[in-house]
Structures are given as C-alpha cells and as structure tokens.
Amino acid sequence: MNRGWKLCPEFRDRPPFPSLPQALSLIKADGRINYLESGPSRDRLSDRGIGEMAGERKFKDQTSAQEEVVRKYFHQVLDMGKTELIEELFHPQCVLHRPGGDVVGIDGARGVAERRKETFSQFQTEILDLFGSGDRLVVRLLHRGVGGGKWRSRLGHYDVTGRAVSWNAIAIFRFEETKIIEEWVTRDELGMILQFGLLKPATDAR
C-alpha cells in the first residue's frame, strides 16, 4: 500500500547528500575524511585562520624590526663607533641599566658608545642568541676587544692599553614601537678583570 511518504519539514531545506564521486573526493590519501572541504564550518575556520595568520605576521614583522635595531646598535654603533645613530635607535626617555649604574636619555646612551671608543681601540661583537617576546628582545653576546685607554669597572678605573680581552654578556631590550626605551645588561666582569691581569686567578679553583 502506498502510504504517500513525505519529508519532514526540518529535512526539507537541508542540502542534499553528496554523490558518490563527491563523497570520495572528501577522503584523504590516509583514509581520513576531510570535513572542512566545503561548507560554512570551513569558512568560519578559514576566517579565524586568516586572522591568526595576520596577527602572527604582524608580530614577526615587529620582531624583525626590533632585531634590526639591536643588530645595528651592536655592529654599527658599538663595533664601528657610529654614535650619530643613537637618536635613530633609542627613545628620548630611554633608561639603560648597566653594571656601573643607570644611564638615562639619549645623551646617556651616546655617552656609553663614546666611552666604548675611548676604552677599546678595537672592538667586535658576536651575537650568539637573539629571541623576543612581545615588546622585549634578549641577546646573548660575545665581545672581543683590545684596550686603548682606561677601563671603568666597579672596582675602579684601570689603564688596559694594548691588552686583549673577551667576555660574555646578556642584554635585554624593551621597545616602544621600534625604539629602545629600556635595556638591562649583565657581563662577565670578573673574567675581564682576570684577563686584564688586575687580579691573579687561584692556582687551584676546583
């Protein structure tokens, strides 16, 4: 007997089931079904993915710009003595927390670079590690130099002319957009003192 079957209203507006070729096209090579091949779910996820990608790209661009500033500071300002670049790289209200005390402002940052030129006749920086998060960038460094005058330390001022030295340091930079607004520096000052011959190392330090 023909009962005159009818579709329930809630099924009437649903899209038709895929044909066999369409269904097979959704199956990946590894046997899994690609549910995101079509439909509004894929579109929503795609929109979210595009937003996340844009955010990641913006973060990478910002980090790249900050890395360029840091590299220019070490290689061009400190290594090559181009102190005229200080205003380009540092914020007017910058604060540098250095081993000998805090340095404030553009003039203070320029003074750090000028003293480097007075202290070392040769100076070279090797960046060993560089990574960032948000508005901060961390750098692990190896400095090499040859003394050319008086070296300032927390123990006093010493003439280190002609003496070769190398030391490790870690610098943390905080940025205001693409300018350095704060820096923290730690360095192996004891190692420098021993290399300069200002103190004699213990005969057996084990």
Image (cartoon, helix red, strand yellow):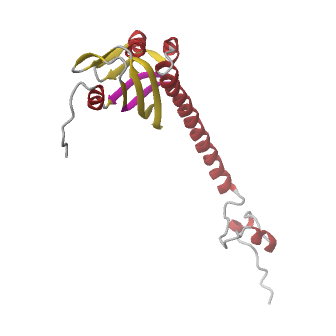
Q: Is residue 139 above or below residue 29?
A: above
On the image, the x and y values in percent for residue 76 come to 52, 21
Residue 202 figure quarter: top left
On the image, the x and y values in percent for residue 67 come to 52, 31
On the image, the x and y values in percent for residue 106 come to 43, 11
Q: Residue at x 60, y 38 (%)?
A: 57
Q: Nearer the viewer, residue 143 or 131?
A: 143
Q: Residue at x 67, y 55 (%)?
A: 42
Magenta extent: 167-186
Residue 142 figure quarter: top left
Q: Is residue 92 above or below residue 184?
A: above
* One can see residue 91 in this view: yes
Residue 171 in magenta? yes
The main secondary structure of the magenta stretch is strand
* Left or right: residue 143 compared with residue 47: left
* One can see residue 134 in this view: no
Q: Residue furthest bottom?
A: 1
Residue 47 in magenta? no
Q: Is residue 112 above or below residue 56?
A: above
On the image, the x and y values in percent for residue 62 come to 55, 31
Q: Residue at x 42, y 33 (%)?
A: 141
Residue 104 figure quarter: top left
Say which quadrant the N terminus sits in: bottom right
* Left or right: residue 120 compared with residue 158: right
* Left or right: residue 159 compared with residue 122: left
Q: Nearer the viewer, residue 193 or 101?
A: 193
